[in-house]
Image: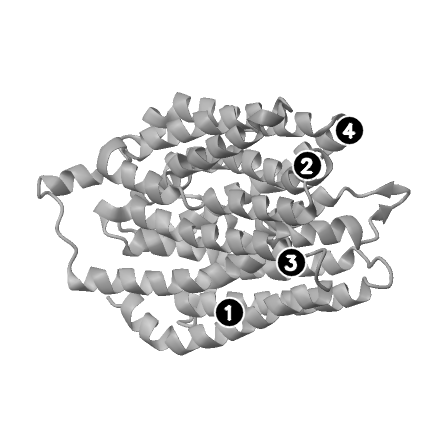
Amino acid sequence: MANSFLSDHPKGLYLLFFVEMWERFSFYGMRALFLLFMVKEMMFSVEKAGNIYGLYTGFVYLTPLFGGFLADRYLGQRRCVTIGAILMSLGLFMLSTDIKPLFFVALFTMIFANGFFKSNISSILGMLYEDNKEKKDSAYTIFYMGINLGAFMSPLVCGTLAVKYGFTWGFFSAGVGMLLGLIMYKLLENKYLKNAGLIPAGKKSEDNEVAEVDNEQKSRIFALFILMAFSVVFFTCFEQAGSSLTLFAEYSVDRGFFGHEIPPYYFQSLNPLYIILFAPLMSCLWTYLASKHKEPTSAEKFTFSLVLMGFAYSIMAIAGALSANMPVSVMWLVVVYFIMTIAELCLSPIGLSLVSKLAPKQFLSLLMGCWFLTSFLGNLLAGFWGGKYETMSHCIIFLTLAVLSFVSSCILGMFVPKLNKIIDKK
C-alpha cells in the first residue's frame, strides 16, 4: 500500500515536496512566534497584535492572486518561485535583526514573497501530471505531507531557539530554512522539472494556441468559487491556531510536564504531526471507497470538513468555560487539533487538486491564487476574532465559531447536488 502511494510519480514531485517543506518551515516557524513576539517584545496590546497577525497572515494569501497573474502572463511559474524564495529569506533575516523600524518592512517583504511563491509551486506540480486525475490526487496528498512536515518541525526548532536564546534566533532559523529550500530548488529544477512552468501559458493564448474558455469551463470555475466561499469559513476557524488557540495555550492550559513547562508554540506542531500520520491513511481510505463506488465527492468532503470544525469548537467552548476557574488539561487541545486535522484533510488538499483539475491552463496560477484568497479572508477574520480574546468570554468566542461552522455546513449541503453535477461531469 505504501509503495503504491509513493511510487510511479515523477522525481519533480519530490523536489517540490522538499522545497515546499522548507518554505512552510520558514512560514510556520515565523508564525508560531509572531503573536507572542509582538506582545512581549514589541509591547503591542493583544488586540493590536491580533489585528496585525490577521492582516499579515491574511495578506500572504492575497498576494498569490497577483503572483499567479504575473506567472500566467509574463514571468512563468518557475521564475516566480525563485523570486519568492529570495524575498522570503530576506524578510526573515530582516526580522531576525531585532531592529524595530525594520519590523513592518520585513512583513511587507514576506507578504510579496509569498505572492510569488505560493500559488506557483502548486501550479508547477499540477503541470507535471497533465490530465492524469488519479495520480494528481495522490501527488497533492504527498505534496501536502511535505507542507506539514515543515510545519511540524518549525515550531519545535524555531520555538525552542526562541525560548532558549530569544526571538531573534527563532526568526533567523526560519530564514535559514527558506535559504536551504532555495538552494535545493536552483540546483535541481532544470533536471527534474524539465519545461514545466517555464513558459507563461497566457503568452500562448495571445497567439491563439490555447482555446478560449468555453461554457462548461465557466460553469466549473463558478463551482470552484462556490466552494471557495465556504472555505473562508473553514480558514477563519482553522487559523485560530496562531491567535486565540495560542493565547489559550499560553494562559489557560496547565502545560506542566514532568517538572518542565511545554512552550505554547509546541501545540502548533500537533496539526502537522497529525497530517503526516493520517494523510496516507486518508488517501488510502478515499482509494478504498472509490473502489467500492462510495467515495464522497469533493463538495461532500468540503461539507464534512465544516461539520468536523463545528465539533472541534464545540469542545473548545466547553474548555473555555472550564478555564474560567482553573487551567485545563493539555488533552483538550490534543483532541481539538486532531479533529481539526481530519477536517483539514477533507478540504485543503482536495481544494488544491480540484483547482488543478478544473482550471483552464491559461488561468491555472491565477485560479490557484484565488484558492489562496480564501485563506486571506479567513486569516483576516481569524485575526480580528482572535483580537477579541481579552475582551470576550472564551466560551463565547469558541461557541460562535462552532455555530458558524455548523450553519455553513448546512447551507453548503443544499448546494452539493448541483455542485456534484458540475464538478464530476465527464
The residue closer to the viewer here, 49 or 233, is: 49
Quick check: 305 above or below 189? below
Q: Are marks 3 and 2 in contact (CB under 8 Å)?
A: no
The residue closer to the viewer here, 343 or 35, is: 35
Which x, y percent locates residue 287? Answer: 44, 61
| CA distance separating discs 3 and 2 | 26 Å
Give whichever of discs 2 and 1 has the lower sequence position: 2
Q: Is residue 176 visible?
A: no
Q: Is residue 69 visible?
A: yes
Viewport quadrant of the C terminus: bottom left
The image quadrant of residue 163 is top right
Quick check: 94 above or below 228? above
In front: mark 4 or mark 1?
Answer: 4
User: Would residue 346 appear left or right of 77 to someone viewing this image?
Assistant: right
In front: mark 2 or mark 4?
Answer: 2
Q: Amino acid at mark 4?
A: Lys
Please name the residue shown 49% across and 47% down the image. 58
Q: Which residue is mark 1?
A: 304
Give whichever of discs 4 and 3 has the lower sequence position: 4
Q: Amino acid at mark 2?
A: Phe
Please name the residue shown 52% across and 75% down the image. 407
Q: In the image, which disc is placed on residue 133?
A: none
In front: mark 2 or mark 1?
Answer: 2
Q: Tag 2: Cα neighbours inside 10 Å, few (<14), some, or many (≥20)?
A: some
Q: Which residue is mark 4?
A: 164
